Amino acid sequence: MKITSNAFRANSRGALQDRNLQDALGNLKRGFQEKRRKAKARLPEFEELQDHAVAIKEHSLDHLDFYLERFEKEVTARGGKVHWCRDGAEARATILKLCKDVNAKRVVKAKSMIAEEIAINDYLEANGIEPCETDLGEYIIQLRHEPPSHIIGPAIHLKREQVADTFREQHSEFPDARKLDAARDLVDEARHIMRPRFLSADVGISGANLLVAETGSVVLLSNEGNIDLSRALPKTHIVVASIEKIVPTLSDANVILRLLSRSATGQEAAAYMSFLTGPRGADETDGPEAFHVLLLDNGRSDLLKGEFERILHCIRCGACLNHCPVYGVTGGHAYGAVYTGPMGAVLTPLLEGLEHAAPLPEASTFCGRCEEVCPMRIPLVGLLRNLRVRLLKKKPDGLATRRRLGVWLFFATRPSLYHGVARLLLRLAAPFGRGGALSVGPRAGGWGRRFPVQGGPTFQEMWRQREKAKRP
């Protein structure tokens, strides 16, 4: 997806007016948030695992070159091949060559955010190869020609009725009068379409939740089983993974996996957990004859040892999206990017360039909920603040803004003076009535720039009166 610098503000205004979207987003609170809370409560050592997982990621990134080379050695020893790709263009060209080498006409693809990042579907289609999404959510949005709205729930922005309408429009081979009222009806119809594609596909493509240097294994999680079908049936399997997915050992992978599913969907573990280690062996009944792993950089090595390295700890669980008040009312498409929510507001400007994603660091209330629920303890608020500082320095009116901030800081660090001036301004604004509004502050990117004028005493005045009344 092409990032546009002014997309978020315009898109978010439209999202707030979309009643279907607002109804669909209600599932975040009713579903993901509550399930995560219960899953964490059932695991007393959750926070201890977090500390361990953070240490694993820090160690892995400190020795990234060593572990990636060890991974390549193990994959090669087991009959697979590793391809190093500097950017999306190189990754797309490599995948296309691998497909053409086996005269592929159809590719079945498991859900993969990194594949979305390099826009592989459009590229394959433009070169005469049919890409078929197999995750149900991804399949739905492929029919609708939409990008994912969420890391783990690509079609979470849609209501069941909208999905049924899409199926009726796209699946012309089924009777018009068929029943599509229940989720099971939709799943059965999608399965009827997908199964022949699995059987006829020449190549399977997946992402990777983790890469294990010790064994050369690729770890994949799924709740539908489509990943296993994408791997087991086609003769060629291609894994696309970003370089920060590496961990040293299977034991290290287990630590992170115990956090991932609980943080993502509130499950103890995903329904399907696959460890792919090379092509099919002589004594195995299924699996690909050829196994390829693409290790993609695409700007990530530039983040190592810098102020934004911690974003490379992200395990794509989606917890920060599920708890973000901004994402909760705008949905993912408002961000105009592959990665959305708080983690996307950090990662997208770093990968695409701040000039292409200027509004995203400001798409946060700084409430800190994203940091609180992040299983990898990523300081998302601090990273967003650092991006805002960079953005402010790039703005042509940066000097004027800094002067306004300086004036505000002068009063904010002198509470007595601040409260006195605030009371005076409120008194002056009172004649405008209860429906009026007072514009104050440094105009922080549109967040909280206008405050309604209320009649009567201020909150602090009421608090002081209450405390005084408590005294004997």
Image: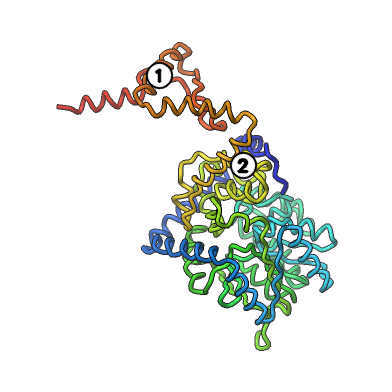
Q: Nearer the viewer, mark 2 or mark 1?
A: 1
In the shown orientation, is residue 472 left or right of residue 379?
left
Q: Residue at x 57, y 43 (%)?
A: 387
Pick the residue in front: 48 or 412: 412
Residue 405 image position (x, y, % from top left)? 50, 28
Whether residue 158 is visible to the viewer of this picture, yes or no, is no
- Number of residues whose C-alpha sits closer than 10 Å to that of mark 2, classed few (under 14), some (14–19) or many (20 or more): some
Callout 2 touching callout 1 (CB < 8 Å)? no
Q: Earlier in the sequence, mark 2 or mark 1?
A: 2
Pick the residue in front: 440 or 184: 440
* Quadrant position of residue 300: bottom right
Amino acid type at circle 2 is: Asn
Q: Residue at x 48, y 41 (%)?
A: 366
Q: Residue at x 61, y 71 (%)?
A: 218
- Number of residues whose C-alpha sits closer than 10 Å to that of mark 1, classed few (under 14), some (14–19) or many (20 or more): few
Q: Where is the C terminus found, in terms of image quarters? A: top left
Residue 10 image position (x, y, % from top left)? 66, 35
Residue 282 image position (x, y, % from top left)? 68, 88
The furthest residue to the bottom: 283
Pick the residue in front: 153 or 334: 334
Amino acid type at circle 1 is: Val
Whole-number angstrom distance, CA of label 2 to CA of label 1: 44 Å
The furthest residue to the top: 431
Whether residue 183 is visible to the viewer of this picture, yes or no, is yes
Helix, strand, or loop for circle 2? helix
Q: Which residue is mark 2?
A: 20
Q: Which residue is mark 1?
A: 421
- Above or below 19: residue 83: below
Residue 94 image position (x, y, % from top left)? 77, 66
Helix, strand, or loop for circle 1? helix
* Quadrant position of residue 135: bottom right
